[in-house]
Image (cartoon, grey):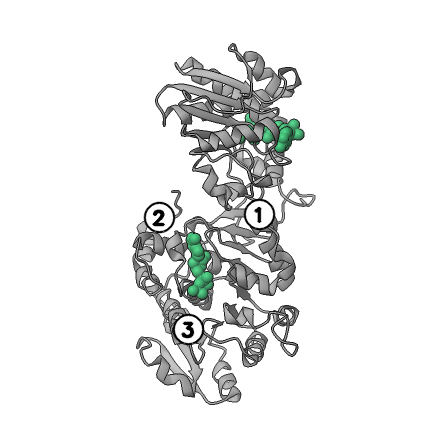
Amino acid sequence: MSHTQDFHDSEFRLLTPAEMGRADTAAIASGIAGTVLMENAGAAVAQAIMSRWPPGRALVACGPGNNGGDGFVIARHLAASGWQVDLALAGERQALRGDAAWHAQQWQGDVSPLPETVPESVDLVVDALFGAGLARPLEGVVARFVESVNAGTAPVCAVDMPSGIDGATGQALGGLAVRADLTVTFFRKKPGHVLLPGRLLCGEVAVVDIGIPAHVLHGLSGASDEAGSVDPGNLVFENDISLWHDGYPWPSMEGHKYHRGHTVVIGGAVMAGAARLTATAAARIGSGLTTLLVSQGSLPLYASTPASIMLQGWQDDAGLHSQLRDPRKSAIAVGPGAGVQRWLEQLVLHVLSLRRVTVLDADALSVFEKTRSAASLSPSDLFRAIEGPCVLTPHEGEFARLFPSLAANGDKLSKTRQAARESGAIVLLKGADTVIAAPDGRAVINTNAPPTLATGGAGDVLTGMIAGLAAQGMPVFEAACAAAWLHGEVARAFGPGLIADDLPAGLPAVLRLIHPASGRQGMRR
Ligand SMILES: NC(=O)C1=CN([C@@H]2O[C@H](COP(=O)(O)OP(=O)(O)OC[C@H]3O[C@@H](n4cnc5c(N)ncnc54)[C@H](O)[C@@H]3O)[C@@H](O)[C@H]2O)[C@@H](O)CC1
Ligand SMILES: Nc1ncnc2c1ncn2[C@@H]1O[C@H](COP(=O)(O)OP(=O)(O)O)[C@@H](O)[C@H]1O
Ligand SMILES: [K+]
């Protein structure tokens, strides 16, 4: 994921529908006919269907564009393998164009108009209505058909994308989209397959090869320079070990604890558990030293801090600043349990002025909400102060306080990228589809987090994991991606009944799995 490595042809790269269109065009320009791509696409979908369901009666619903063209190919292959196939077309057969028209001619069976309801006797619905080309909400007979598909019991295989989902954002245009059991897409996933609600409406996602050569991936995004190289800042990925494994700060034989960084967590005076979770997570993820700094008066609250964490008190601001001065303190995390108060604004600005790696979470974000009080600072004061490496880890509520004008945008990927650009920080917007974006536009979507993570303190742990990795010298964007993935993986491995304390405790088992000695470099589920 670093700028020096080339991730253009990573299998975890996500292509926007526009990039996918350019990939198709480039593949055709390199000598593969569009009709062949469509044949390969339809054949692969039919194969995916036949490997999952026994032959029966399939209703193949075709749309007016190339997604519908794929449907004609699928129908032909299923019929040739003994399925009883009903093909229904939304629109006029004569209106089909290009590759879709060509493949429609190869279909020997009947073509009926799209019904408003799915007949009871159908064993499988193939949704080939709209894919990447969907431009407006579903309406009319198509909308009623999709409602009937979703109300019925027949399993659904969506071609490329469940119809109704915007492939760039994962949003259901107009609020209505097919709910599929299987979605077969081509070449690479699209953001809509991994962002919510799209991911949930896809069911299982299978990515199939249709003959597009990988080299086309180098020329798809953003402005290419004359040499044809593309700014890696435009690329979007699904999070995976392979994206950050090479930069992971495994301890080396020659190292000592000062080579493994020193994470400082600044705790508050009331909610002591939060900062303790943050500090414990930083230590567990390998920070050589971890210090928890709290006011002298609140030391008793922190009595049960693990012995491996250095608990230190400060008397006043001058004392706190002098504790932070040592440049070996390589990463500073502020926010969990800090308390929303004037003092925190000033502390955050001081911490940022030190230009160490800074991770700001929870109260350290909320305290900059503009409407909090007339005297308080605003998000722009925070953004102005961000000059060194910094990660902001808001959940949706905190995001709305910092970026009120972006919050209503339903497109999580673009709003997180915009927030990173505005703030100059890495922004990690939490949720089941956490998006991590850098100011240069690089973005990663995390997909392994189970809903058991929605438990108090889980975010505090994530903050500590990011700070602890960055303290050891891992670049902050990669540290945020690695932490989000490990956080999700630990929760998955733990299963039901998870509380935040289980996350640092469960890290070693997952780290063992991805350690270079395990031979595992990447993982598809
Ligand atoms: N071009 C290629 O080489 C390949 C394309 N493939 C298929 O082509 C699909 C993309 O094809 P298209 O770009 O033709 O797009 P679609 O087939 O998704 O549909 C686009 C057509 O529907 C119209 N439309 C969009 N939204 C509508 C709405 N809500 N109601 C009514 N009409 C609407 C558009 O104006 C356009 O005519 C992919 O999803 C994939 O399934 C595959 O065959 C692989 C190869
Ligand atoms: N439904 C969900 N599925 C998966 N992960 C989730 C879900 N809801 C929340 N999370 C994750 O759980 C963590 C919660 O963090 P946060 O909201 O800051 O809680 P806290 O402040 O209690 O620590 C985040 O990492 C978030 O991405
Ligand atoms: K579809």
The answer to whether the residue bearing label 1 lies less than 8 angstroms from the nearest atom of ligand 1 is: no
Q: Position of residue 492 (x, y in %)?
A: 34, 52
Disc number for residue 275: 3
Q: Earlier in the sequence, mark 3 or mark 1?
A: 1
Q: Nearer the viewer, mark 3 or mark 1?
A: 3
Q: Amino acid at mark 1?
A: Leu
Q: Secondary structure at mark 2?
A: loop
Q: Compared with residue 305, is residue 141 higher up or lower down, i.e. above or below?
A: above
Callouts 1 and 2 close, C-beta under 8 Å: no
Where disc 3 sits, the SS reads helix
The label on residue 520 is: 2
Q: Position of residue 180 (x, y in %)?
A: 45, 34
- Which residue is under mark 1? 235
Q: Secondary structure at mark 1?
A: loop
Which x, y percent locates residue 146? Answer: 52, 31
Q: Residues within 10 Å of mark 2 (few under 14, many from 20)?
A: few
Query: 478 or 333: which is nearer to us?
Result: 333
> In the rendered structure, which amino acid carries the disc numbered 2?
Arg
Residue 208, can we see it? no
Q: Please identify the quadrant where the C terminus is shown.
A: top left
Which badge, 1 or 2, is on the more N-terminal residue?
A: 1
Which of the pair 349/433 is nearer the observer? Answer: 433
Distance of label 3 from label 1 (alpha carbons) = 34 Å
Q: Is residue 311 left or right of residue 368?
A: left
